[in-house]
Image (cartoon, grey):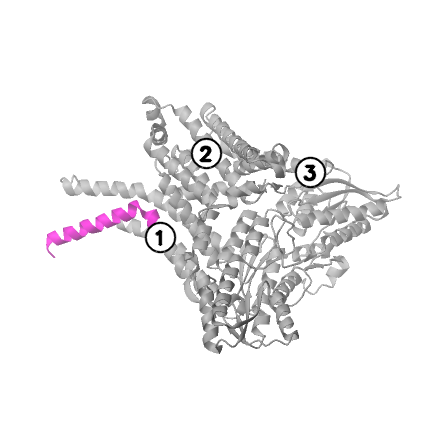
Amino acid sequence: MPEGDGGRVGRWRRRLLDLLGRNLSVVVLVLLCLISSVATWREQNPITSRSGGAVARQVLEACQASCSVLVVARDTEADRVFAQAIEQGLDAAGARIAGSVFGQPRDVRLELERIAGAGDSLDAIATHRIASDWGPVRTAGVRVFAPRSYHWPTFLTARNLLNVVNQNADIAIIALGMTLVILTAGIDLSVGSLLALAGVIAAVAVQEWFGGTAASPAGLLAAMLLGVGAAALGGLLSGTMVTAFRVPPFVATLGLMMVARGLALILAVGHQRRLVGGGAEGTPEAVRVDAAAFAWLGNGAVLGVPNPIVLMLVLFVAAHLLMTRTMFGRYVYAVGGNVEAARLSGVPVTAVLLAVYCLCGAFAGLAGIVDASRFEGGRPNAGELYELQVIAAVVVGGASLAGGRGRIAGTLIGAMIIAVIQNGLNIAGVASYEQKVVFGALILAAVLLDRLQPKIASRRARMTRASTSTPVQ
Amino acid sequence: MKRALAATVAVAFGCALGACAGGTDGGESGSIARGTIGYSAMTLKNPFFKIIADSLTAEAERHGFDVVVTDAERDVNRQSQQVDNFLASGVAAIVLNPVDRIAIGPAVRRANEAGVPVFTSDLQAVAEGVEIAGHVGTDNYQGGLLAGEAMIEALGEAGGEVLVLHFKQANSCVLRVDGFRHAIGEYNRDRTEGRIEIVAELEGGGLRDEGYRAMADGIQAYPDLAGVFAINDPSALGARTALEQAGRADQVRIVGFDGEIAGREAIRDGEIYADPIQYPDRMGVMTVQNIVRYLDGEDFERVHLIPTELYRQADAEQDPTLD
């Protein structure tokens, strides 16, 4: 083989591997999406205006305009649109609509009985695949028309993709704060408990101080800020322990984790007791918020995109800018890289650490507000074991637990990788015990990668040196 | 470098591919027959819910359904996600043991909006504005009454101090304790001697280890205890261990709840006095039968509560399922 050719191939291969190595987490994410798509390749049943029109045409082709048709659909928005299209199509051709059912199988049975009782004729039922499996439809003794189904990965449906991101928006939001902490070679185990505390405080505040059901938007906002503020204060406390008293972050935040969880439970139980008028001890159930606007943040949507996703994206952009474009961001990396060097070169180490823990707490608090809004109440048991999922997301995203290395964008991808694994496993129907094994193995793989990367880098450096200078040994 | 990279990539994908392989045999047969039932269990770490899952799966497959079993691990957030995943994958029906009877509300409402029927078993949902197609559970209040009767029987005319190992997060357990308190209250009425006094309710978590710790503390706080009512078998067994370690096993009688195998064995061996027993297998079977009736448009009992029966040592000695 000519030498020049081999060199070029080698260079290309090296470049490709370089690119893959640097963006490995993106590659992993894409591959996981592909695998999830293949694993969830299923029959899809369209329930749309278009498929409704198609069913109407099927009916008309089969039995001309003279036949009498029963339209069956469920009582949902999509079903109504679908059924309306069928009715319009049949109407336009002059077919007779014997009746329309919007409801459950039982309603179909009753309607069929009514038609039979009235002595009406019935030639066909027009419906979708799901209702065509219903007992009364199958046994009606007339031809049943439904739109043709097609195959498509369930994973790759708009509903599911929004699902995946929405479900994990809170994890991703906390992971932002955790990234900052991990960049300084710290760790924060209290995030799950702070999430619960923030949610419970916000819910109790709405119910007891800001008017309950009649709470004004300003009152709701104040309650939410109170929750976030409490969580930020918790973070500040951890930061103080770490900086002023040199308590290892693991221990400081472990303590706070228990204290915050206990406080959340105490507040919730106290509220439940006041609800039932004192006496017996309350139960650790969710502190319910009835004000409809409270649920908007967690369950509402902007232009079809669920609010938690919007919030997550906004926070990610903000955090990304903070870490890449500001002095503060550079300070955080400096503290994580080498504390002493940072101190000597004038970085306000204590202030940076305090700010980092405080931010992490605030992000956990925000996630707690999202959670409370999503479940229409503050749950004292919310966020259990979240710290581990969050740390997993950050580590999978390429941050080093030794500090100094990691990116906000990497964390976003890490959070999404974890989300896709969980969702993919769930909708592919993998049993829950097996899921744990796969999930744990992936975390190990990510950490393995973390361990190998410096080695790869140094070997590469050695190789380059060896090829450019005369070998010493 | 290449080898190291390849190795890590392989490890990561190996995991993912494992998921893929596991997934295809679960989902392939979905298109034939009657569709899929999605079940979100409260926690599969408790044998009780595993029995519901197994009996539900067996009965559903007999009727031509596929079943996807998921574990909410006592986390309503996880359970809501599972409901959303069921909706995204287009199941025919959803079965839940609601982890939080109120906070599960928004998820059930989303299922209602999507036109997918939700059935509950064991625990009921009480959130506002949600539609539950059917419920099969234990008559927990009646079970609590029976537990009270068993305690009265166990303590005899002497009466004494009784401790409750609670799990307040579950409303089923709140009902059990309500029934228990009612039975004890009736017994105490117009009685000055041999009264039974409920001295405390401790949080036993419904788990063996937490029940053990709570009981160990309870022995210290209430040295004159004569009886313990634990709201399920795992916490009753935990309490038994604590009593044995303290050398008090002979003085304190235990009444449990459930009648799972470990509990029934303990009753046979005289370690637990009696259990009101539940029938998780019937819950799974009846839930599927309700789903079939729903899809066939038939009428059925929307809330069906299965009464418990008291199970004592004499029953255990004749129990063919214990060896």
Q: Position of residue B172 (x, y in %)?
A: 68, 50
- Location of residue B51 (image quadrant): bottom right
- Location of residue B63 (image quadrant): bottom right
In primary-sequence order, the first of circles 2 and 1 is 1
Along the horizontal axis of the image, is A32 left or right of A18?
A: right
- Identify which residue, A243 or B69, lies in the foreground: B69
Q: Secondary structure at mark 3?
A: helix
Question: In the rendered structure, which segment of residues is drawn in magenta?
Answer: A1-27
Q: Label 2: few (<14), some or many (≥20) within 10 Å?
A: many
Task: Kindly identify which chain the residue marked by label 1 belongs to.
Answer: A
Residue B308 shows in this picture: yes
Residue depth check, mark 2 versus mark 3: number of the one nearer the observer: 3
Q: Which mark is residue A30?
A: 1
* Residue drawn where x is 55% and y is 53% of the image: B110
Q: Disc 2 marks which residue?
A: A360
Along the horizontal axis of the image, is B245 left or right of A95?
A: right
Magenta span has A356?
no
The CA distance from mark 3 to mark 1 is 50 Å
